[in-house]
Amino acid sequence: MTVSQPVNSVPDPVNESPPAAAPSLMSAFKVRDFRLVWAGEGISLLGDQFYMVALPWLTLQLTGSGLALGAVAAVGGIPRAVFMLLGGAMTDRFSPRSVMFVTNALRVILTALITVLVLSHNIQLWMLVLASLTFGLVDAFFFPASTAIVPMIVNKEQIESGNALMQITAQLSNFVGPALAGLVIANLSGVTNLQSLEATASTGDVRGIGLALGFDTLTFIAAAIALWLMKGGRAVSQQQEKQNVLASIGEGLRLVWSDSLLRTIIILTAAINLFFSGPMAVGIPVLARNLPEGAAAFGAIISAFGGGALVGAILAGALPVPRKLGIVTMLLIGAAGAALGLFGLVNNLLIAIGVGVGMGLAIGYVNVASMSWLQKRIPPEKMGRVMSLVMLGSFGLIPISTFVSGLLVDYHLTIMFGASGLILLFLSLYSLTNREIRAMGS
């Protein structure tokens, strides 16, 4: 069970009045600050897809090793997990807008530096490890802020609209971005399959990778400008100003621990992501490297997943919430696990695209539906801290997941995908023995 942007019921006085009638899927667009957040983060998310294709492909070009790929991905998750709770507390203390603006400015500097190093042919593996660590630290503060800002700028009646629109935009970026990035890298760098990768490693043709990273830098600038233009999202919790950081974090921990269902969902989320995130992050680029289309295949598979998730998010926003939401989401996660296992048997790009679409459809629906449920359960004044715990459940075990996946993928790609998919399927079915999960509904 993955998570996305939550929204709650606190209106912002600087934005337009809420519509009197029941809102539609597009009603959050009536709010000026929401439009700015949506535009800035939408552009930034597109740039992130270029980075997510460029970094693993650059790692493979430098090393040719799945283990190195897993290590680079894993180290970024360490500071993200360690500092996530602090990021939630700082979000409530200094306001989501302020934290997001500062972190986007830091991302501009970091991606610009990596771009220069790549294009000047001075990039080395240790630099990628350091960059991954730094991005992980910045993400630990950005993610809680980005999940807390929308609640401050939309009204209660616009919860489903804002949540669905942000998730749809994210999945649209997942659909478009990786394919574009894969084509840019493949065409400009001349990297297609394993043989050409080994041939170009010595020449260091990284023009496409450098262009992809440079584009990501520009998107962070756009996101920072959008945040600067906002009028809302600046409120600071008076209670947080009076509490020290540890007391603030403890308050969020006590809230989650006292809610048995919320506690179970966070633990289950961590377990599911352990067997999903690493295999996807490490296994898909290695799978694509073994296909004739190479980098373009990598982008196409990730885009297929994003396209399926886009449709799933639209369905979740447009259809009524199921009465048995817990059962529906767990069954969809089980279906995603089965699809993950199928990747180990794929030797054709079209089949891989089909599997990616089906998996994305299930995950996209679960993201929106589960987040909407969480939004209604979490007290608005504690949204930042509690959501940092939810995201810690999502991201906390990713370093272990990616590192172990890197070890397994060098041993046998099919076994890595198959074992992960079967465990994910088992977890989803086993969770249905929990009465509270079966009773989850609208």
Image (cartoon, helix red, strand yellow):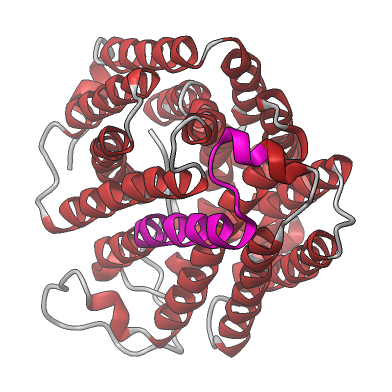
Residue 80 visible (yes or no): no
**Which residue: 45% across, 57% down?**
380
Quarter residue 101 falls in: bottom right
Q: Is residue 369 above or below residue 337?
A: below
Q: Most prominent secondary structure in the magenta stretch?
A: helix
- Quarter the C terminus occupies: top left
110 left or right of 159? right
Identify which residue, 123 or 294, lies in the foreground.
294
Quarter-wise, where is residue 160 in the image?
bottom left
Question: Which of these two is toward me, 206 or 123?
Answer: 206
Image side of residue 328 versus residue 407, left or right: left
Quick one: 40 or 187, which is closer to the camera? 187
Vertical arrangement, residue 352 with respect to residue 385, above or below? above
Q: How far from the left and from the top, in percent, is residue 166?
A: 37, 64
Q: Report whether residue 169 is seen.
A: yes
Q: Give the residues in magenta.
A: 170-197
Residue depicted at x 63% and y 62%: 208
Where residue 268 sits: x, y (%)? Answer: 43, 23
Residue 436 on image: x %, y %: 27, 21
